[in-house]
Image: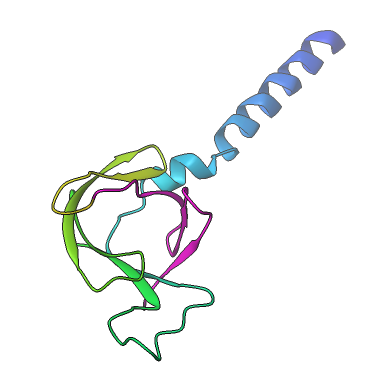
Amino acid sequence: MKKGDLSICKLLVLIIIIGFTSCSDENIQENLPLNGKYTHLIIGCDNRGNPEINCVEFIDFIDSSKVIVLIGGGDIVIQTKYNLNNNQIEFEKIGGLNFDVSFEIQNDSTLNRLEDGGIWLKKE
């Protein structure tokens, strides 16, 4: 084998190895199951004067299409549907939810709310 042919073979092997080992976070996130409860503490929230104000928001994934939501500091829990597209979750405006709610999956225990950048953590 010529020296040039050997260099090309080494380069091809290197490219193949890099291709197999470079798995993007997006592909990993697509395979993460959405289950359990995620919470978010509303910064600066003070409910001492009104116990109906909730300082902790939550979302609880019921199954592959439904979620229970307590969001915005209110006291009304809403059940709605959600769609998962790549690593983004978008809630449907049904069941009393009348504003946009969407998240980007960071990893198996962290969601980033796209509307305000809030970090939601999975409750153990």
Q: Residue at x 35, y 49 (%)?
A: 101
Q: How many marks?
A: 0
Query: In this orientation, which residue lies closer to the viewer: 31 or 121?
Result: 121
Residue 63 visible at all: no
Q: Does 47 appear above or below 90?
A: below
Q: Does 7 appear above or below 95?
A: above
Q: Is residue 116 magenta?
A: yes
Q: Which residue extends farthest front?
A: 49
**Which range is magenta?**
98-124
Residue 25 visible at all: yes
Q: Residue at x 30, y 55 (%)?
A: 33
Residue 48 position in % (x across, y down): 40, 91
Query: In this orientation, which residue lies closer to the viewer: 114 or 105?
Result: 114
Task: Specify whether 104 is left or right of 2.
Answer: left
Q: Residue at x 32, y 64 (%)?
A: 71
Task: Specify whether 95 is left or right of 60.
Answer: left
Q: Is residue 1 magenta?
A: no
Residue 40 position in % (x across, y down): 43, 70
Residue 15 position in % (x across, y down): 67, 25
Image quarter hosting the N terminus: top right
The image quarter in which residue 122 lies:
bottom left
Task: Specify whether 56 is left or right of 114.
Answer: left
The image quarter in which residue 55 lies:
bottom left
Q: Does 96 appear above or below 5?
A: below
Q: Residue at x 40, y 85 (%)?
A: 47
Q: Does 111 appear above or below 91?
A: below
Q: Which residue extends farthest right?
A: 3
In this picture the colour scheme is rainbow
Image quarter hosting the C terminus: bottom left
Task: Specify whether 45 is left or right of 81.
Answer: right
Query: In this orientation, which residue lies closer to the viewer: 110 or 119?
Result: 119
